[in-house]
Image (cartoon, rainbow, N blue to C red):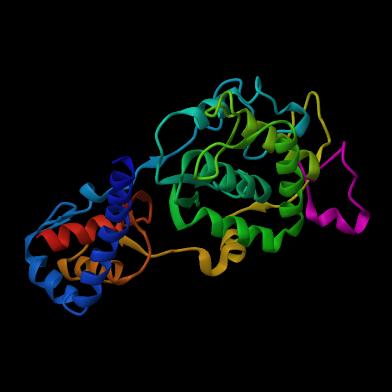
Amino acid sequence: MNINLDIAALASAILYPLVLLIVFILFRKEIPALIKSLSGRLTGLSIAGISLDLAKAEAFSPNWVAQGALDLRQKAEAANVNDSTAGNFSTILETSGEVDYVIINLGRGKEWLASRLYIMSIIFENRKGIKGIVFLESTKGTRKKYIGWAEPQKVRWALANQFPWFEKAYSDAYSIVLDQGAKIVNHKGRLGYSHDPYSSRSSITLLENFLKKIQSPPENPPLPEEEMEWVNLPSDPINPSYTKEHTSWLNAESLETSLDEVLITEKINTTNQSPEDIEKQVTMSLISSHEFIAVVNEEKQFSYLVKREKLLEQLLKG
């Protein structure tokens, strides 16, 4: 009986999206005409039976600067990463419920190190089940300006391509965590322990050992010809640490270079737009193959992601 129920659930999970895809392919040419016919009934963030609000993806925006917490985006030294100092991070990881995407704000270019984005893309996908990473920046006139979004695995591989020592450091750190008793505790590849599968300690240990492999001291110091590939970590001016990390700072320009074609920049602007403009944006978004679509305002400030599949569902039901 249980086997039959599992098979039915699996069939439903596989067939439903497939049916949506088949219907979409069959009526692909008709979608622009359908949207055009509905565009006269635009209200707020909806177009006839299609509501952007009802298609919102679940966001995840960690507080990196909580009182007493290590700023893992840039400042943490490997020697200081432990269950106590990374308590805020542990709480973030252990909060129940999966989310669709995480928001990474690069600010003006001194907020995120490439190495931290690399390891966080792995940890957040593993622990939180994220399917997308949204990148924002701050410019002279605009805060939280949308850059684009990308799938976490593609972010990892793009950064590993540019910074090959990241993958070696991660492999070594992962082996250490396994040697200390961690194991895969579910079918999605989550790291944990048999006695406490929900504990985030394995992720903290993974982060600590990853940083050890790319920081100096205590690892081997950089050679003079490699100095340009190393960053002096921000530290307390009263008690400086002089720790270097084999990485680089990320800003919008360097991110676009690093991620290249894996960065998805398409978006829907919902403010001060004519019905024709919104019609064109929605049409192009529905025709694309990407899982999410970003919604921004006229200044390109990010509002949220919507699930393309949910928009298609509404269109078909309408």
Place of residue 241 in the rendered image (x, y in percent of width and height, measured from the top left): 82, 31
| Residue visible at 90% across and 59% down in the picture | 225
In the image, is residue 230 part of the stretch drawn in magenta? yes
Of residues 10 and 72, the one drawn nearer to the viewer in this rendering: 10
Left or right relative to 220: residue 237: left
Q: Which residues are magenta?
A: 214-232
Question: Residue 79: percent from the left, percent from the top?
Answer: 78, 29
Give the image location of residue 298, x and y in percent: 31, 57
Q: Name which residue lies at 81% across and 29% down.
A: 240
**Where residue 297 appears, x then y in whole percent?**
31, 54
Q: Quadrant of the N terminus?
A: top left
Position of the C terminus, as image quadrant, is bottom left
- Asked if residue 111 shows in the view, the reply is yes
Left or right of 45, for residue 97: right
Compared across the picture, whether 81 is left or right of 33 comes to right
Residue 32 position (above or below residue 201): below
Evaluate whether residue 142 shows in this view: no
Observer-nearest of 205 and 311: 205
Q: Write the residue at 34% across / 45% down.
A: 3
In the rendered image, which quarter is residue 157 located in? bottom right
| Residue under the point 38% across and 51% down | 301
